[in-house]
Image (cartoon, grey):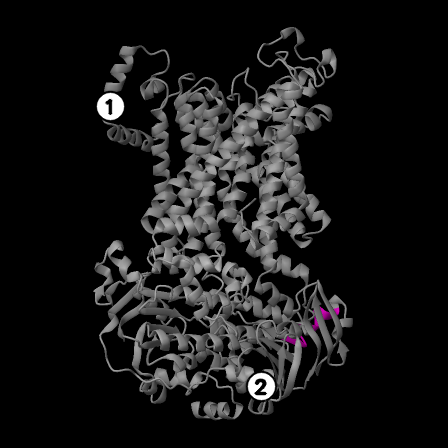
Amino acid sequence: MLDYHHLSITFGDVEAAKAVSFSVRPGEVVAVVGESGSGKTVTAMSAMGLLPRKAEVTGEIVLGGRNIRQLTNKELRELRGNEIAMVFQEPMTALNPVHTIGWQLVEAITLHQDIADPKQKAVELLTMVGLDRPEQRLKQYPHELSGGMRQRVMIAMAIACDPKVIIADEPTTALDVTVQAEILDLLRELKDRLGTAIVLITHSMGVVADLADRVVVMYRGEVVEQGDVEDVLIRPGHDYTRRLLAAVPRLGSGSRQAEAATEPVLKVRNLVVSFAGQRAVDDISFEIGKGEVLGLVGESGSGKTTAGRCTVGLQKPTHGSVELFGQDIARLSTRGMRPLTARIGMIFQDPASSLDPRMTVAECVAEPLVLHKAKNHKERITELLDAVELGSVTRDRYPHELSGGQRQRVSIARALALDPDLLIADEPTSALDVSVQASILELFLDLQRRLKFSCLFISHDLAVVDMLANRVAVMHKGRIVEQGSRADVFGDPREQYTKRLLAAAPVPDPVEQRERRVSRG
Amino acid sequence: MSGPTARRLKVFRRNKLAVAGITMLGLLVLFCFAGPLVYHTEQVLTSLADSKLEPGVNGHPLGTDDLGYDLLGRLMLGGQTSLVIGLAAGVLATMIGTLWGTIAGYAGGWVDAVMMRIVDAGIAIPALFLLVVAAAIATPSVPMLILVIGLVSWLVPARLMRAESIALRSRAYVESMKVMGGGSVRAIGKHIIPNAIGTVIVNVTFQIADAVLLVAYVSFLGLGIPPPAANWGGMLSEGLTYAHDGAWWLILPPGLLIVMTVCAFNFIGDGLRDAFDVRFEGR
Amino acid sequence: MARYLLWRVLQAAVVIFVVTVVVFFLLHQIPGGPARGILGVQATEDQIKAFEHAQGYDQPVPIQYLHYLGRLLQGDLGESFQLNQRVADLIGARLPKTLVLTVLSTLVALLVAIPLGVWQAVRRNRPTDYLLSALTLLIYSTPVFLVGFIFIIVFAINAAWFPVEAPQADTVAGVFADSQALVLPVLTGAGVVLAVFSRYLRSSVVDNLDEDYVRTARAKGASEARIVTRHVLKNSLTSLVAMLGYYLPVLFSGALVTEKLFNYPGMGLLFWNAAQTSDFPILLGVVLIISIATVTGSLLADVAQALIDPRTRRVKA
């Protein structure tokens, strides 16, 4: 059906793909997995004939007996959307914002088909991808739909002309886990119904386990291993695959217990934050004891980040109080707040923007020391960079010269510079590759055990929180729906929402994942 | 400095127009400021007997104007005025605009709303009209033109810097500094303005280009700096009034020099924009 | 949408208020003060004193401002020194003609700039694109009056295709009747913004071509021509609409220069004549009207954009 044959793609000096060969049979899901820079997206995109002009390609891509590389532009256009279609990662931006859903869907149909009533066909497609009120949806614009609904529209467009192959590039990465589960179910159902082959590009082993029949593992442009999903995921043959699988955080691997109650360092009471009348955070209360890690989990829009920002004064609460070390921060002046700021640190999600691009690593780490007029900067910086396992060579580097993982280590060093009693970490590893994430989490765990700081750890990833937290609070639509010890919340959840969340997170084991899917119903 | 600066220099150098702009500007500065050192002419006392001589006559390579001033020498002198006004007014406007916009954007809320409505009002009153009113109130001089052009031109940079400031204030490195107890002055001075420096620099070049044009317009409307002081805009518009005499040499050279100067700054600004990768609506 | 409209109108009202404060401030900077400004240079000291008292100019400044605002609301912009006419009448007779000039110039500029910008974007970073970029920058860098002057020399004097002077008629209908004389002024006015619009459109189309939705359209099998005309152009033109409002002050400044060059009796020429004779009531009256026109124009442009763009149907600050 679709064959990649000794395909190599180079951009200038960079070899994005090296002699890649694999094939996709009708009705089968082939997952191409790898971390960023593995060349998985470029490889898959080449089948669409949509590589940038400067890309140099050798080898063959054969679709239905025709070598794509020998087709003219016109022939390629007739192929695209008709025999081979695509679903992209970002449903937010992949649709044209100024055209209606209907217009874009009809375009996908009429570009390749001459049918009397394309609108009717569009309605059928929307029904097929599980959107309610399809006639009304046609008149809506992309921004009026949620992320999950937009991804359904993208899928509807992809299947509009009954293609032989769909290339799905990280189709669920931008979505919440519960929505991800629904989209994966939809793809599985469509594949069975239409017999379409799917090339699934993903970094998530859980997604692979859930949907794939076969797996191609890529690392730095090369295919290191390929085979049936069960072989590769359960009995990996290549060392890289083993490392990748070991790095995936798994639910149920956590071991930390709730500590005995101590005087809380952070106490949040009846916190409410409203934006334009909408309650982003709706009456939540929690506290964190000395040396304790509280995991705050929730999907996007649950209010977890806003709640975290309130605890350090970045966001003013509409109601309720935040007490840091026994003092209500709303009653403190900027001056009165200063001594408290020396006792807290914060780590943000995006390693690209967490460091000032015009400061060297040493200057970044020194900033809290300068702000609080600490002494002996030099020694302290050395100590901190050692603690986060960064060599002294990085001292004078600029952030853009560092990898994402290294940058996040610098952020941790900076947050720990004044030996804080409380750390707020907002999704500190979710922008990182899984192997980098594993090493950062290990470092974090180690530092926390050694320095015994308290921590509010905000994350959407239940497995990560399972690894780090003593206690867990689950947020949903601005409220804390459940909170308790890690073992209780994850082992024996009381609330329906928590159960759904736990069930939706895919595990990187195809057999176990199948069972979970079945029990989910 | 390592990385960023070197990379920007490379991008800038690759832009042929930008390099042409720098070269043109260098030549213009040399002509205006070093020229008079080797080419001496009388530029204070008029000599009506030599009025409107054609190029080459009586040892005047570019001829003379209506008051008998040697045109080549006058172009040098006038260029000094045009360049000084453009440069000073452009820098002044960008400085005011940078501070105003950065503070408005960083503060947000009511402060921002009030500060930006003032900017909106300023933008609504076309700069050229204000300049003419100012020229009608007081006789134009170099410092006055610098001040007035600076005061009517800071609004666009203020808008741009506000947008920049809003984008930067929510960057994690600014927020983490705030969490660690840093204040607004440090946030603006140490993080926001340094990271918006590209916008500022590109802005200065475009502002200078616009200021040189504004001076020309004011002169064309007959409200420029009176003689014996000279500037290219004034020379050009005076030349236009003698166009029916066929005195082309009074029009072509100052016109060309103005276009060259404005082009040079615009080319440089274009190159810098690519180098710093900043956005400018409509430029 | 209704909330956005209300917010935007309120904003415009505040801006106009600030403009009146600025003009009021300028009125006080006139040599001899506002009384001299209104009574004229020939008035005696006693007349001035009496007038200042009668008009309340001896009262505190805020009260004076309120009086000024009150007169404005009644449409009273004062009387001209030189022309013995009400400023409001003078402006009222000429504003439509200036609008004719600016609107026509804008249309011509758009007619050239849109295809030019799109064409450059499609052929971006090739020699023709560089050449056109340099050319548009060259036009931008040339003073409007020089462009107009070249037009006069080439098309009016040498070729004698068009008259040197703009239409001199009093009415808009009369102006259109003399349409041949209108060509050069309109082209000159178009030169002011043509470069700005084409450069804006070029960069907007280039940016849009990098967007994800374009990749989606390509993946559907749409041709490049279809992608530009059906997908990208609608996005780019939507943002161009708001740009139009933004460039109104530039258009009016261009009109001032163009009217002077072609002796076109619009508001710009009225303003220029007033500047020569220090006729401050006219000067400040024109500044006020032009500013209000700009604010209103920007408001209309923003509202139009909000109506075209499905995304702005929500409140944006």
- The percent coordinates of residue C163 (x first, y second) are 65, 25
Q: Is residue A264 magenta?
A: no
Mark 2 residue type: Ala
Against A255, residue C222 (above or below) is above
Quarter of the image holding residue A26?
bottom right
Disc 1 residue type?
Gly
On the question of residue A477 being in view, the answer is: no
Q: Residues within 10 Å of mark 1 (few under 14, many from 20)?
A: some
Q: Is residue A462 above or below residue B84?
A: below
Query: Which residues are the magenta region?
Result: A75-85
**Nearer mark to the viewer, of 2 and 1:** 2
Q: Is residue A80 magenta?
A: yes
Percent position of residue A384, x then y: 42, 66
Instruction: Write down the quadrant of residue B155 in the picture.
Output: top left
Outermost residue to the top: B49
Which residue is identified by label 2? Answer: A212
Q: CA distance from mark 2 to mark 1?
A: 86 Å
Q: Is residue A111 above or below residue C140?
A: below
Which chain's residue wears label 2?
Answer: A
From this viewpoint, is residue C205 visible? yes
The residue positioned 29% from the left and 15% from the top of the image is C48
Percent from the top left, x then y, of residue A44?
Answer: 65, 75
> Taking B217 as reference, is B188 left or right?
left
Residue C118 as seen in the image, left or right of residue A394: right
Q: Mark 1 highlights which residue? A: C56
How many C-alpha atoms fall within 10 Å of the one at disc 2: few (<14), some, or many (≥20)?
A: many
Instruction: Report x, y in % for residue A348.
Output: 42, 66
> Which residue is rendered at x = 59% and y = 37% of the image?
B265
Q: Secondary structure at mark 1?
A: loop
- Seen from the viewer's position, the closer of residues B40 and C176 is B40
Looking at the image, how many numbered discs can be counted on the residues? 2
Residue at horizontal 33 percent and vertical 76 percent from the top: A294
